[in-house]
Amino acid sequence: FFFEMMSVGKGVLLLPKQRFGALVQSVTSLGNCSCTRFFKRSSSSSSRNGAHHQPSTQTPPAPLPKIPLPGVKNVVLVSSAKGGVGKSTTAVNLALGMRAVNEKLKVGVLDADVFGPSLPTLMNISGAPNVNERNYIIPPVNYGIKCMSMGFLVNEEDAIAWRGLMVMSAMEKLLRQVAWGDLDVLVVDMPPGTGDVQLSIAQKIPVDGAVLVSTPQDLALLDTKRGAKLFSQLNIPVIGVVQNMSHFKCTNCGEISHVFGKGGAEAFAIEHGLDLLGDVPLDMSIRTHSDEGKPIVIAKPDSDQAGVYRGIAAKVLNSLAVTC
């Protein structure tokens, strides 16, 4: 009930209602048809005049300065540039692993996947968040982690049918109009791909490092390579690579099987001079506890699987030189 329907051309968009005020003001304004008319007018004008694109001889404008998030000391992006490789599960367990390494740390997680948010399920959080007197969203907290996701603002079964400009505006508000407070680390669970959201986050806020997540499979590594290239172009240091679903250990006989291939992400890390942060097994308990909203680091802190995530977290914190 936080969204209302709005017709745009022949389609329908879900737009947030006014309850969140400034959070969605610029998002809803993008539904105005004036921008559509502008693009149509520009296109038709060029066609009538026979105009063709000419390379610009002007000096490109200097990039806008990145504005830090108030109170946030470090920002870490968790990216795979591909869906279905366990990136969100890794991001959540990384954040929880940081707290397990040092319980004094103040850690937050931002789910930047507007179209497919998974943080509400992973962190067992439901319901709309509250807002403070400044109309900033107060991020819900569970397991000691501050969380924010578009999934808190829509019903679980609702599809978010937004175009790029609206997504960018919504992402800006999720960054700027959330009362994060003081955080030692904000872990950002990036959406798949190397598009608008990735560029928007990387170019608007200081980012201290990125963690790449991939299975050993060659097909997954193709997109991981693209993600690494993007971060290189944006001058964002890659802290290292997590090889997820690296192997499967039979619970009956103990035999090790490499379902998605063997050592592909490790070879990628060596080839690009990156650290292999850890090998996360393909394990039933990781999946089960994630679906139940109690990640493995919380559900079974003494397990080998939780130990892998704590080890990854310790390496990331060491790279950031985070102390408390």
Image (spheres, rainbow, N blue to C red):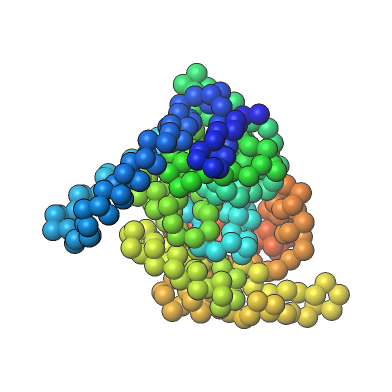
List the single residue furthest toward the right.
252
- Looking at the image, which is closer to me, 168 or 65? 168
Whether residue 310 is visible? no
| x 43%, y 79%: residue | 271
| x 52%, y 73%: residue | 221
In the rendered structure, the answer to whether residue 46 lies left or right of residue 36 reads left
- Looking at the image, which is closer to me, 269 or 219? 219
- The image shows residue 17, relative to residue 190, as above or below, that is above
Residue 282 falls in image quadrant = bottom right
In the rendered structure, the answer to whether residue 183 lies left or right of residue 200 reads right
| x 56%, y 68%: residue | 214
In the rendered structure, the answer to whether residue 196 lies left or right of residue 252 reads left
Whether residue 2 is visible? yes
In the rendered structure, the answer to whether residue 213 lies left or right of residue 48 reads right
Q: Position of residue 92 (x, y in %)?
A: 61, 51
| x 78%, y 80%: residue | 255
- Looking at the image, which is closer to me, 276 or 284? 284
